[in-house]
Amino acid sequence: MNITQNCKTKTLGAEFGWNYNDESRRLDIAFGAKLDGEMGWLAWGLNPQGPHMVGTRALIGIKHQNDSLEYYKYNITDFTRLGCQLLPIDDLGLDIRKFSFFYLEAIHYYMIKATVFLPLGYNSSRTNIVWQIGYAVADKEPKMHPTSLKNFDCAETIDLNSNQVITYKAHTRRSLRMAHGILNIMGWGIFLPVGVIIARYFRKFPMHWGFWYVFHVSCQIAAYILGSAGWVLGLWLGNQSKYYFFRTHGIFGSVIFTFTTIQMFALRLKPKRTDPYRDYWNMYHHFLGYALLTLISINIFKGIAILKPEDDWKWSYIGLLGFLATTALAFEVCTWTKFLRNPENSTEGKTDNPTAQPTAQPQDSAGTGTSVQPPANLNL
């Protein structure tokens, strides 16, 4: 077999090479990857329906615990996806010859080789290739492969005549997943907690900053725009994933978006400071905000676990959380220190009633009086 065209797949570290003769419709293939476990299986196949698992006519090589090798033909159906037993069949509807499975010691790869004569119904200019690697075997039955996103990205459409990859959806999906993660981390994971810190520690106590409200609202709006864009992108990705989904991650994302939207209504619908139920509204607004921060952190970690990027992502986010927590803790210590040293001024400074009257002070010898007027700051 003379393999002249090669395509290095982008997932699972597999290698695929082929040679195609359009006149005879003969396709020679060589497909290999490492199987590091005591047992495992390697699969390559064609799918006339599209670049996905269901409908694939697969050639699967099996490695047993005793290092013995077997290889069979399988038809992957909807029942396979639902967990039904996958057993070998003789007729795939393809003319397959010289099918073999062996270990190539020079590169430590397990290899599938075969010659396939494509039926006339197969479009050689848009051939759907599917591959997979698993690590559990029961006799002749390959068991479920790992459920990482890399394992779900093992498909592409190639032109056997021009040797070009026409569609490799994994490229686009990976880029969109990264964009989804970055938008949510920037929005929900950075701008939102920064806005909370500004509102809590720069409004009145321990220090007053005249522009706190502008920066608080700006951070919350930026967080909402970025986070909402990430959420919409996540919905689209979920809709494109017909054969797999991450239910908990999706539910958490929708809950975060819904209640963050409710929080944003505070910009226009919050009660006036003179309303009798303003204190109850403040408690609800603050409690929901802190609950959202907790849920956001949990869901970001879930997203990182799903994407399985480099460890730098996980540790970078842990470092970011540590920095925000340390900053908040430092301001909290400052707040309580200042309060304990001068509780009267602290209480005055935190007055939330804009109509409060000045507190009369003892008159001096000239008969003049002095008073302290609390600052009329905006209050969330």
Image (tube, rainbow, N blue to C red):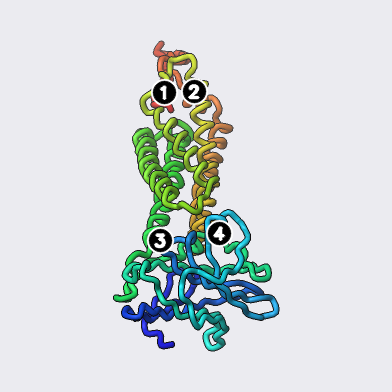
Q: Position of residue 87 (x, y in %)?
A: 61, 66
| Residue that appears at 54% across and 85% down | 104
N-terminal-most mark, 4 or 1 = 4
Q: Mark on residue 50?
A: 3
Contact? badges 2 and 3 (CB < 8 Å): no
- Read off the residue under disc 1: 270
Q: Residue at x 49, y 67 (%)?
A: 57
**Circle 1 SS class:** loop
Viewer-side label of 4, 1 = 4
Q: Nearer the viewer, mark 2 or mark 4?
A: 4
Quadrant of the snapshot with the C terminus: top left
Q: Amino acid at mark 2?
A: Trp
Name the residue type under label 3. Gly
Side (left or right) of 238 relative to 339: left
**Residue 309 visible to an observer of this rendering:** no
At label 1, which amino acid type do we have?
A: Lys
Give the Cα distance between marks 3 and 4. 20 Å
Q: Secondary structure at mark 3?
A: loop
Mark 4–mark 1 CB contact (< 8 Å): no
- On the image, numbered disc 2 is attached to which residue? 281
Asked if disc 1 and disc 2 are in contact, CB closer than 8 Å, the reply is yes
**Looking at this rendering, what residue extends furthest in the left direction?**
162
Q: Nearer the viewer, residue 3 or 273?
A: 3
- Identified at 38% across, 61% down, the residue is 169
